Image (spheres, rainbow, N blue to C red):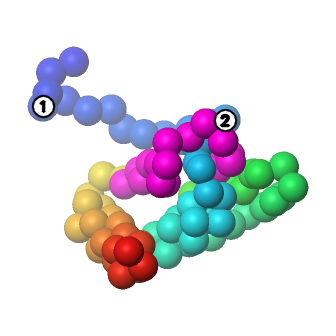
Amino acid sequence: MSDDESYELLGFDNVLLPVGDLAEAVGFYERAGFPVAYRLDEAGIALLKVGVETPGLLRDSHAASGMQGLLLIGRGEAEAGLGLLQGAIAPLRAER
């Protein structure tokens, strides 16, 4: 595939993102517009609502310090997605 081509994302399944701090990661994604569908703190897991999908966040003591993440933006939504991402990051910068 060339750099000018891309695939259309139809969905995703069984995605768990490792995070060092579950509460911080949940807050980040909520500020980015992805509400929590299910959360079980004892197990260190939270599932997010992303359209009809529910990717998860999994607390991982081996995750790098700070939060790791993934934000998927649909075709034609880059500007709106950038605004969501900036709104989610701004509070993290203010805390430091």
- The magenta-colored residue range is 51-73
- Image quadrant containing the C terminus: bottom left
Residue bearing the label numbered 2: 14
Q: Is residue 95 left or right of residue 59?
A: left
Q: CA distance from mark 1 to mark 2?
A: 28 Å
Question: Closer to the camera, 60 or 79?
Answer: 60
Q: Is residue 56 left or right of residue 67?
A: right
Which residue is found at the position 73% from the left and 63% from the top?
37
Can see residue 87?
no
Circle on res. 92: none
SS under mark 2: loop
Q: Position of residue 76 (x, y in %)?
A: 26, 58
Q: Amino acid at mark 1?
A: Asp
Which secondary structure is most common in the magenta stretch?
A: loop
Q: Earlier in the sequence, mark 1 or mark 2?
A: 1
Q: Amino acid at mark 2?
A: Asn
Q: Position of residue 18 (x, y in %)?
A: 59, 42
Please check the rendered image and state whether residue 5 is part of the magenta-colored stretch, yes or no: no
Which residue is found at the position 72% from the left and 56% from the top?
46
Residue 13 occupies which quadrant of the picture? top right
Question: Closer to the camera, 96 or 49?
Answer: 96
Crowding at mark 1 (Cα within 10 Å: few <14, some 14-19, many 20+): few
- Work out which residue is located at the far right of the displayed protein and give it: 42
Which residue is found at the position 66% from the left and 42% from the top?
61
Residue bearing the label numbered 1: 4
